[in-house]
Amino acid sequence: MGKASRDKRDIYYRKAKEEGWRARSAFKLLQIDEEFNIFDGVKRVVDLCAAPGSWSQVLSRKLYLPAKLAPDSKDGDLPLIVAIDLQPMAPIEGVIQVQGDITNARTIEVVIRHFDGCKADLVVCDGAPDVTGLHDMDEFVQSQLILAGLTVVTHVLREGGKFIAKIFRGKDISLLYCQLKLFFPTVTFAKPKSSRNSSIEAFAVCENYSPPEGFNPKDLHRLLEKVGSPSGVDDLDCSSAWLEGPNKVYIPFLACGDLSGYDSDRSYPLPKVADGTYQSLDPVQPPIAPPYKRALEMKKASSQGIRELEKLSLDS
Ligand code: SAM
């Protein structure tokens, strides 16, 4: 698909380039904020699975830059934003980057070191595995990323803080809801206008972090497993989430973003220009080391090898 054709088919892709965002995902976080005011009073944030960096850009523009440009700004008082991804990411003002795996305990230690004994007010996680097309497999890997995000939360989020995480609306959604409810009294599943209806993606907006009394992060997985077991967890009003009928859990689900705004499933005409030729903008920041780069190099090397072998056999 050509760039101009994608510009026409995907209004948020085009708008992202016009507004200087590295990815259209920026609009998802902005629209979640419109509904839930997630940046209110936030000074420390962790951005999990951050590359290529459009959510980090939102955090920088919403939190870091206004504080830096304020007349009474002090260096030591500026918001702290730590972004983590497996992939390297081009720099963003006010964002500390950590290249690492969020499922690895060492990555959590690095984040804790950056916060220097303080806790975060907000953790966001837009993590997505490379989708295989096998729905059960994709949902499983996605749920593992959310649980890794929740592990980070239990180590770095302050009580009362918020956690925003990408989820897939699959068959285990009630179980995930109940697991998140163990730690957050308010959990809403939100669908920003910029996220296509055709996609099973949504976002869990978890507010007011309140871990169970005496909770030790080491016990997280044992506690989460209990939610899915027939005996359930005491005091959890949705421990029977997997049951049908009257025991079924109803999950708060909210569309967010200006509902009369752009529809991500529609095509929009390209803007008219004076000479009638539409010039598509280049991406704001192409990924600096995308995983497909190595695959392309290998493909190129192997077709070169085949050509050389063919040449040898013709010469002999
Ligand atoms: N929020 C980003 C933005 O706005 O630019 C987009 C995130 S992209 C949809 C998903 C990211 O998850 C990818 O960059 C991928 O490298 C990252 N990811 C997947 N598994 C990860 C893991 N175990 N640890 C760290 N990052 C991971």
Image (tube, helix red, strand yellow):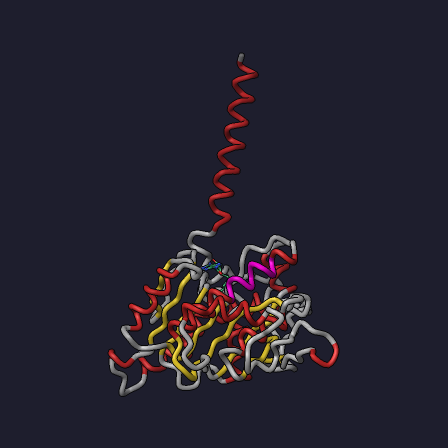
Magenta span contains residue 30: no
Q: Residue at x 47, y 44 (%)?
A: 294
Q: Name the outermost residue toward the front.
A: 231
Q: Name the outermost residue toward the right.
A: 245
Vertical relation: 308 (above or below) 261 = above
Q: Residue at x 36, y 72 (%)?
A: 81
Among the 4 quarters of the image, the one containing residue 80: bottom left
Q: Where is residue 76 in the image (x, y as percent from the top left)?
A: 24, 79
Q: Total marks drawn?
A: 0
Q: Position of residue 19 (x, y in %)?
A: 49, 71
Magenta span contains residue 142: yes
Work out whether residue 316 or residue 135 is closer to the camera in this orientation and state it.
135
The range drawn in magenta is: 138-146
Work out whether residue 114 or residue 216 is closer to the camera in this orientation and state it.
216
Q: Position of residue 5 (x, y in %)?
A: 64, 59
Q: Is the magenta stretch mostly helix, strand or loop?
A: helix
Work out whether residue 280 or residue 130 is closer to the camera in this orientation and state it.
130
Q: Can residue 64 be seen in this view?
A: no
Q: In which quarter of the image is the N terminus?
A: bottom right
Among the 4 quarters of the image, the one containing residue 57: bottom left
Q: Residue at x 40, y 86 (%)?
A: 41
Q: Can residue 128 be seen in this view?
A: yes
Q: Name the outermost residue toward the top.
A: 316
Q: Position of residue 22 (x, y in %)?
A: 47, 64
